[in-house]
Image (cartoon, rainbow, N blue to C red):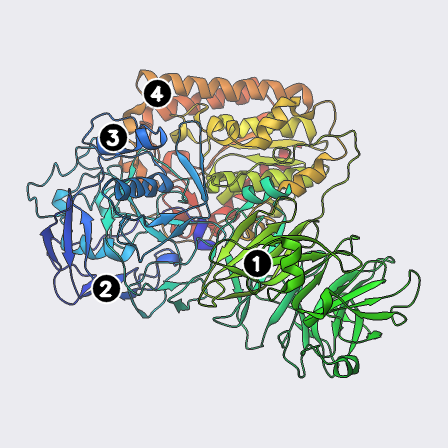
Amino acid sequence: MRCFLILLIAFLCACTESNHASWQDGPDVNIAVDSLSGMLRISSKGAVRLGTNDASAKSNERPQMRVELDYDFSIGRYEVRCDEFNALMKPAIGLTLKCLYGKNPATDLTYYDAVLFANERSKSEGFDTAYTYANAQFDAENHCTNLEGFVFHPEKKAYRLPTEAEWVLVAGANWNTAEGWVAENSDYQLHEVCSRTNNTARVCDMIGNAMEWVNDWNGNFRDTVLTNYVGAPDGGTLGLRVVKGGCFRNSLKTINSYNRGDVYTVTSATRADYVGFRLAFGEIPNPVWMGSNGNAASSRITALANASLLRSLIGTSKAKLAFRNDVTGNLAYIDFSSAVPSVIEIEDTLEMYHPEISPDGKRVAFCTKIEGIAGTSEVYVRDLNAKGSNLVKLNVPSAAIPRWRVLPNGDTVIVYVTDVGNNKDDAVFMTNSTWQVKFANGQFGMPEKLMDGAFHGGISEDNTLAVTGARLLRAHIALNGQSPAIGTNVVWYGGEQACNASLAKDSSKRTLFLDFGGVTGQTFAGTSYITHERLLVADSTGNLVHSVGAPSGFTFDHSEWAYGIGNMAVATLTNVNGAHPKIVMVNLLDDSVIDLVEGDELWHPSLWVKKGMNVGDDIVIDLDSAGVYFKDGQDWAHVSLGYKMSMLWKYKDDIEILCVGSSRTENSLMVTALTSGFALNTGHSGNDMNASLYVAENYGLNHLSKLKFIVVSIDLDLWHNSSEYTEILMANTPGFVYDANHGFWVSGIPDWFLDAVEESSQYSEIARTIYEPTRGFFSDNGVAWGPATVEFDSSWGGATGDAKIKWNLERIKNFIIKTAPLGVKVVGVVFPQNPGYRETGAWGRYGPRRSKAMAVLDSLNRYQSEYPHFRLLDENKNGYHDYGDECALNTDHLSIQGASKVTLRLDSLLQTMK
């Protein structure tokens, strides 16, 4: 898991100019000119090896995995050109890239931009499309940042992006280091495609020029052999994508076939001026995905809804869906509040049917027998997490179809029945019974019998109604205040066949059920229909009050009311072959049916929605904005900063030391080890100093009542930026805009605001796991400094560069002045980088010239004399520092060992400043 956030480590390159590269197995690749414009036809029955066994490589690049390809496909001879992209996409979605030269690669585009281009080319040539989606989201420049319900269809004969395996296979036949535009020869700029080769039958620019999107989600490898591998089934909780081939900024010695990422984390919404793509064409027979559990499968389950869609429909993204994957028999679930909703499957040998999520959303109950099948069943409860931890069994002779309830006294209980077989026979039905058992502190209490008869469809809040449906729709009706055991059993729906009964989880006492095209239902609906083609709703007396038709070509199954929100139900859709490929949410107010998830065979959905806040009728809160410091489609920089903003509000009354800055701050300052005070690390990637000080000024100085120190990273090689990243991070993120529009709450934080921050958060489980215990710090064990790679032309310190340096100096100076009367002290930290930069003309990874950096450091040292509450901690010392290889995560970030060292030194400085 930790590999996802580690920045790019420089590797030694093992490359060849042979047509049979070291990572290819089997016969050479046959390449021929294709009839499709700009494409080459690839014919091979060989195999490639993805990844590496090099122990120093990132963990998502290890171990090496063999992939066999048994099909032919086409691939673009060159990266899609800027003029080609604009010609197709400007009329399609209004997106026009800035082209220095039209024949340069199209870059500065998202993964979604690339797949939309592929779709447009497919449509323009009369082919089906390889990518489907429900809704597209675009930024102010018309770049696509999110495709809701996005699904890749490898079986389609269409244009698409190449899979990683396809890309590596072709690269092996075209890996000529002399033909790449790289840092050594590119002048740090893009060049016209194929400008270093004249061979029209060769694929060009696989090395350098533009880095390339490929089709795959960035999943893990394992030491195995797979055929027609197409990547991970989803992006996990981070939504990581794969990019290949390096770019004009990268040194040749750092580019190899197994690298899968960039300097920073790559998601579908990432874009950079050095990342482009090339097309592939053709269907992939019998595709194989491999999930995070290392299991390969010829099918997958795909989330079709995400947080923004749910917020637009039900007002919140705090929702979870649990269901049975009938292919594996396992419990699967989706947390829609996650940054990238993904399907998590809990592997187990237990039979698992009828899961139901607990009222607090933290656990799930399930049984081992299916509705309509008589016999002994067991009920279990487990935590709703990837491990399914804390599994407990209800120790009774038989229990089936658990239903959670919260009693008026606050106790949480589970209602269950002793048998869930066919309920048509009165005598047999009454030999079974309905029970409830308290569940607290992860344990079952003593079961209590409620009534005779197996009423597994639920019990109303006031205990006056219980229902069941397993051939007949039966109800148990009691008077208010009576014991549930005292009441009358009746058969509803005229005794016609019914099933999947579910009693509303509110006070409405409505019963949701399915029928078999009965006369009563058809009369009410005013139309004829087949079995399970309509959802039916009865009131508290059994009279029909509503019905909803299934989408064309489908019928309903496994219908249930949603928890936490009225008028919403969930069900599976059954196709003409009897398979259950989708789970849908049904809105009983407008009869709309919304796709939630897609797979091969999905059963027994349970949808949980967190109940909304009650802040008073006179308060209007925009929960789409308040506290929303991250939105769907944004990259890891936004996830990281957003989650740390939620921690800032959480710990606002405790924080004494606020650490702001770039990813070097995040990787270097182990704030829980500081003895000088309670600290929070808000460092993150994709940052500039202005964005760091934006957080410090508007949130730290205004709302951290115990604040004594602000620690800010001094990243001189990033000072070619002024406020560009501030715009990217803040201007398009609702929470920051909302706060700015309310004056950053300087007059006081409303009582409801902190609840809104919690309600609006939708961060991935990984963000919570790595940041919460460390209060924002993250790094890994040391690797080595590696080659001192200069990513930018270090001579950027010309007139424009000088102006940016001056701007940043003034910015930090003004901030220092601002903090003086507030009694807040400021520490600027220059974190160590690769000592090998001493041998280059660059001060650090991104420049500037060493002479420019020295002048900046002189100015900062003068500030120490002018402003006694400011101190500079220069741990880089122009490369003459004492941080060895064990202290390096990569060429400009510290490992855990290095972080421990710099944190100790910072702590000592803070103690003296007290």
How many discs mark residues in the rendered view?
Answer: 4
Chain-order first, disc 2 or disc 1: 2
Can residue 166 be seen in the rendering of this structure? Answer: yes
Give the CA separation, mark 4 to mark 1.
Answer: 74 Å
What amino acid is at disc 1? Ser
Choose mark 4 or mark 2, whichever is in front: 2
Q: Where is residue 442? Give x, y as percent.
A: 73, 67
- Provide the residue designation for mark 3: 87
Secondary structure at badge 2 equals loop
Q: Is residue 447 left or right of residue 205?
A: right
Q: Quadrant of the C terminus?
A: top right
Q: Which mark is residue 528?
A: 1
Which residue is labeled 4 in the image? Answer: 801
**For numbered disc 3, what is the local secondary structure?**
helix
Could you tell me how far apart the alpha carbons at marks 2 and 3 are, in whole angstroms?
33 Å
Q: Amino acid at mark 3?
A: Ala
Residue found 68% across the figure and 22% down from its top: 822
Query: From the viewer's perspective, is residue 443 above or below residue 705?
Result: below
- Residue depth check, mark 1 versus mark 3: number of the one nearer the observer: 1
| Three-letter code, disc 2 | Leu
Q: CA distance from mark 4 to mark 2?
A: 49 Å
Q: Are marks 4 and 1 in contact (CB under 8 Å)?
A: no
| Disc 4 versus disc 1: nearer the observer | 1
Q: Badges 1 and 3: C-beta atoms under 8 Å apart?
A: no
Which residue lies under the disc numbered 2? 69
Label 2 or label 3, whichever lies nearer to me, is: 3
